Image (cartoon, helix red, strand yellow):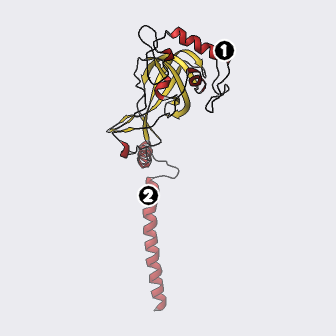
Amino acid sequence: MRTLYIRLIAIVILAVAGAYLGVAGGLVLDSPKGAVPDAASWTESAKEVSTNTPAPSVDTSSCNSYMAVGDGRGYPDIDTLFWVSHQVVTGTIVDQRPPSIHTGTISTDYVFRVEQRFRGVPGQTVLIHQGGGTIGDCRQEWVSNPTLTVGDRLLLFLGSPIETVNGTAYWITGDRQGVWRFNDDGTIAADNARPSTFNGAPFEIVAGHLQRIVAAAVPVQDPDAVPLEEAPVP
């Protein structure tokens, strides 16, 4: 009797195993060995991964606010402004890139087409970087920023480079001190953010002074002076 009982158990086990293997076999037949998911499956997987990957986010506590940040330093004259800058160029703003998130805050890059370069790595354009901008319902403004608009013709003193979503961009040296606007007649617009020496002067006078700085190639004694190796002169 005991032997019969053992045989019955064995038969039941074999039957269950056979049913399992039959289902498994059906699954194998439905998806032959070596088959790979179709393109739609890969697409859905990619969507899932993309959805689960956190995007850069802005600190919403600082939305719709004015941020009191900037260079924080004044420069006594154009010579110092020149030597603490990585780029000194004239030209025109030709494009404003969509704002992006950088280290938790909103920032905006502008494309500047170069007419004349007095200092810096050569190139037909240069990117200007400023904190602030609007993304969705969140707006941030930096009170120290000079106003930049597509079409502005400027003499710019640009400071430290920074890597952004648009490439290598440059902060403005000294905030408003580093933005010299042209009047329609080619003179330099007055701005009380910098010494008044060249306010209203024809640009030829400013250019002549910059060229004398370049020719002398003697950096000022300033802890922030940028070496010629990093920012060459023509």
The residue carrying mark 2 is 27
Left/right of residue 145 with respect to residue 138 in the rendered view: right
Residue 5 falls in image quadrant: bottom left
**Mark 2 vs 1, N-terminal side:** 2
Residue 167, horizontal then vertical, whole percent: 52, 30
Regarding residue 234, the answer to whether it shows in the image is no
Q: Which quarter of the rendered picture does the C terminus lie within?
A: top right
Residue 101 falls in image quadrant: top left
- At a point 42% along the width and 46% down the height, the residue shown is 41
Residue 98, horizontal then vertical, whole percent: 40, 30
User: Element type at marker 2?
Assistant: helix
Q: Disc 1 residue type? A: Ala
Of 80 and 233, the residue lying toward us: 80
- At a point 46% along the width and 71% down the height, the residue shown is 17
Q: Do the residues labelled 2 and 1 touch (CB within 8 Å)?
A: no
The residue carrying mark 1 is 215
